[in-house]
């Protein structure tokens, strides 16, 4: 009995959704939702690209410092690598 009720409820919900999606108001709502989702996707993609570049910079700086440390003769203090990025205020 429960399966029949769930099937009928799904059929009614699908029909109502289809009627809403084909109405002018429904089309506007769907268009706005898709537009908002696309903007969100672009925002997240931009932030992820910035994060990826920052991580690549940190890895390159760490490798540079390690190389300088490995190349320094024993007994000499390690020279600091030049800072990258903006000046701290």
Image (cartoon, rainbow, N blue to C red):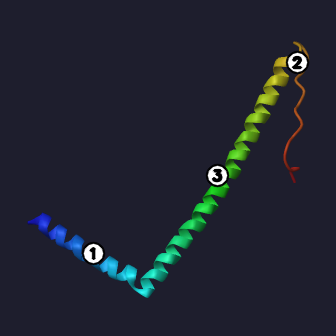
In the picture, the quarter occupied by the N terminus is bottom left
In this view, which residue lies farthest toward the top?
74
Question: Disc 3 versus disc 1: distance between alpha carbons?
Answer: 38 Å
Above or below: residue 67 compared with residue 34: above
Please tell me whether mark 1 or mark 2 is closer to you in this view. Answer: 1
Characterize the local packing of mark 3: few (<14), some (14-19) or many (20 or more) Cα atoms within 10 angstroms: few
Quarter residue 58 falls in: top right
Q: Residue at x 55, y 71 (%)?
A: 36
- Foreground of the two, 37 or 66: 37
Check contact, mark 2 vs mark 3: CB within 8 A: no
Q: Residue at x 86, y 18 (%)?
A: 71
Query: Which residue is labeled 3 in the image?
Result: 48
**Disc on res. 72:** 2
- SS under mark 1: helix
**Image x and y of residue 39, in percent:** 60, 67
Please name which of the two marks, 2 or 3, marks the residue nearer to the observer: 3
Q: In the image, 4: left or right of 48? A: left
- Residue occupied by mark 1: 13
Q: Nearer the viewer, mark 3 or mark 1?
A: 1
């Amino acid at each position: 009995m429960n399966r029949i009720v769930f099937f009928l409820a799904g059929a009614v919900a699908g029909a109502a959704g289809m009627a809403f999606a084909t109405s002018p108001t429904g089309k506007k709502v769907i268009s706005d939702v898709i537009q908002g989702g696309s903007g969100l996707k672009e925002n997240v993609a931009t932030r992820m690209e910035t994060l990826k570049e920052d991580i690549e910079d940190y890895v390159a700086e760490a490798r540079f410092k390690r190389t300088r440390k490995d190349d320094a003769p024993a007994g000499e203090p390690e020279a600091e690598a030049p800072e990258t990025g903006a000046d701290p205020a």
